[in-house]
């Protein structure tokens, strides 16, 4: 979005950012606007910001200094400050289909630059469907399972992801992470 609109892009994680960082970025965005530059602020886990932190964005959203995009796994009606929420549009992102997840996993297995292609791992469509069915439409979880499975498959020759490896990878991936039920962007 920032690229298409020729805007500056600033990303926050609500888990890591504090009020000091928010105020500094808002001051920078206000100065940029005076010079005709738009600023898009993306906040991951926006529901983690407390009321005071959310309030810090409000005057800048109202003045048009920033375009605010937030992602949350929670219901925004309960977790986002009412004044801020009233100035937003809420888009509910639906889980990906099993077929879409399988396609993403296939790409990840062949992409040598950004995926696992350099590992030369093979996986049947049935194995990929199994991963997709257990990750409930969440590509991030599916990628995590695939990455663990690809690592485990390196002990076989040639490297192949089997049902047993998927079972072990699912246990490993789901024991170490928690998955959101649904993603929401405001």
Image (cartoon, rainbow, N blue to C red):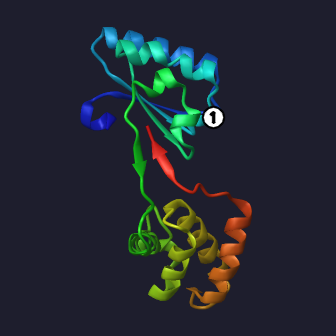
Helix, strand or loop status at disc 1: helix
Q: In the image, what residue occupies the spot 32% across and 8% down?
A: 34
Please name whichever residue, 6 or 71, is drawn nearer the observer in this view of the structure.
71
Would you say 171 lies left or right of 35 here? right
The quadrant where residue 20 appears: top right
The quadrant where residue 68 appears: top left
The residue labelled by disc 1 is: 48
Q: Is residue 95 above or below residue 117?
A: above
Task: Give percent across and percent down for residue 14.
Answer: 60, 33
From the image, which quarter does the C terminus lie in? Answer: top left
Task: Give percent across and percent down for residue 138.
Answer: 51, 62
Please name whichever residue, 39 or 45, is drawn nearer the observer in this view of the structure.
45
Q: In the image, what residue occupies the spot 49% across and 80% down?
A: 128
Q: In the image, what residue occupies the spot 49% across and 41% down?
A: 71
Task: Give percent across and percent down for residue 36.
Answer: 27, 14
Task: Give percent across and percent down for residue 158.
Answer: 57, 90
Would you say 95 lies left or right of 22 here? left
Would you say 129 lies left or right of 2 here? right
From the image, which quarter does the N terminus lie in? Answer: top left
Q: Is residue 180 above or below residue 124?
A: above
Q: Is residue 89 visible?
A: yes
Q: In the image, what residue occupies the spot 67% across and 81% down?
A: 167
The quadrant where residue 165 appears: bottom right
Q: Is residue 57 above or below residue 94?
A: above
Q: Is residue 27 above or below residue 68?
A: above
């Amino acid at each position: 979005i920032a690229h298409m609109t020729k805007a500056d892009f600033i990303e926050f994680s609500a888990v890591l950012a504090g009020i000091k960082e928010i105020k500094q970025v808002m001051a920078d965005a206000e100065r940029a606007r005076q010079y005709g530059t738009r600023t898009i602020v993306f906040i991951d886990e926006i529901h983690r910001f407390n009321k005071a932190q959310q309030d810090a964005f409000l005057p800048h959203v109202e003045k048009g200094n920033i375009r605010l995009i937030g992602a949350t796994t929670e219901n925004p009606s309960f977790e986002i400050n009412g004044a801020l929420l009233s100035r937003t549009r809420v888009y509910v992102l639906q889980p990906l289909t099993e077929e879409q997840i399988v396609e993403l996993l296939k790409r990840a297995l062949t992409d040598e630059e950004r995926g696992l292609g350099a590992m030369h791992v093979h996986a049947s469509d049935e194995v990929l469907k199994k991963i997709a069915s257990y990750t409930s439409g969440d590509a991030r979880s599916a990628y995590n399972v695939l990455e663990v499975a690809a690592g485990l498959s390196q002990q076989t020759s040639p490297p192949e992801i089997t049902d047993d490896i998927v079972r072990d990878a699912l246990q490993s991936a789901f024991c170490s992470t928690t998955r959101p039920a649904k993603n929401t962007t405001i």
